[in-house]
Amino acid sequence: MKLEDLYGDVIIDYAKNTKFKKHIEHNHEAHGKNTSCGDEIELEFNLNGDIIKDISYTGHGCIISQASTAMLCEALKGKNINSALNIINEVIKMSRGETFDKKTVDSLEMFEDISTLPMRVKCFSLSWHTAEEKLTEVKENDES
């Protein structure tokens, strides 16, 4: 995969889409930073029990990190924590070039070849790792 192939219309549209790029009333937040390139995001979650009632982000970064974060918000909104963690797990496996469930990953499959571009994997997966850490923490706290 060539780097320029990543910048298709859909990815550009997601990167420019401000539907999820805003502050919301939230009860959980998570900060992620890619120190190798400077991408930085803040995820805000409004959870009702274990349901992600709303999710948003703020921050800055390359087109890949911004598009990926917008797609994360779209994929996780309305899901329960277990379903969200399953989606996250499959997307992270995909980004590593591992076998993944295409049905679970859904439209994010357009990033399947990101694993061939190691520097872009970090940009792509920043929000996914950030969400995974926060949602795992919330789940563990709720179980204890």
Image: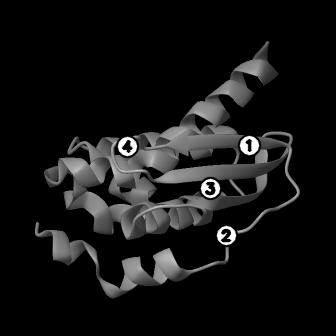
Describe residue 93's horizontal placement relative to residue 73 as left or right: left
- Residue drawn 32% across and 41% down? 93
Q: Secondary structure at mark 4?
A: helix
Mark before the other along the chain sequence, 1 or 2: 2
**Quadrant of the image occupied by residue 82:** top right
Residue 12 visible in the displayed image: yes
Amino acid identity at mark 1: Glu
What whole-number distance in Å separates the C-alpha atoms at marks 4 and 3? 14 Å
Q: Which residue is mark 3?
A: 76
Relative side of 132 to 77, left or right = left
Residue at image mark 2 = 20
Which quadrant of the figure contains the N terminus? bottom left
Furthest residue in direction left, as rendered: 1
Using residue 61 as the reference point, say whether residue 80 is left or right of it: right
Residue type at mark 4 is: Ile
Which secondary structure, mark 1? strand
Q: Which mark is residue 92?
A: 4
Which residue is located at x 82 percent, y 61 percent? 24
Residues under labels 3 and 2: Cα distance?
A: 11 Å
Is 7 or 132 nearer to us in this picture? 7
Q: Which residue is mark 1?
A: 29
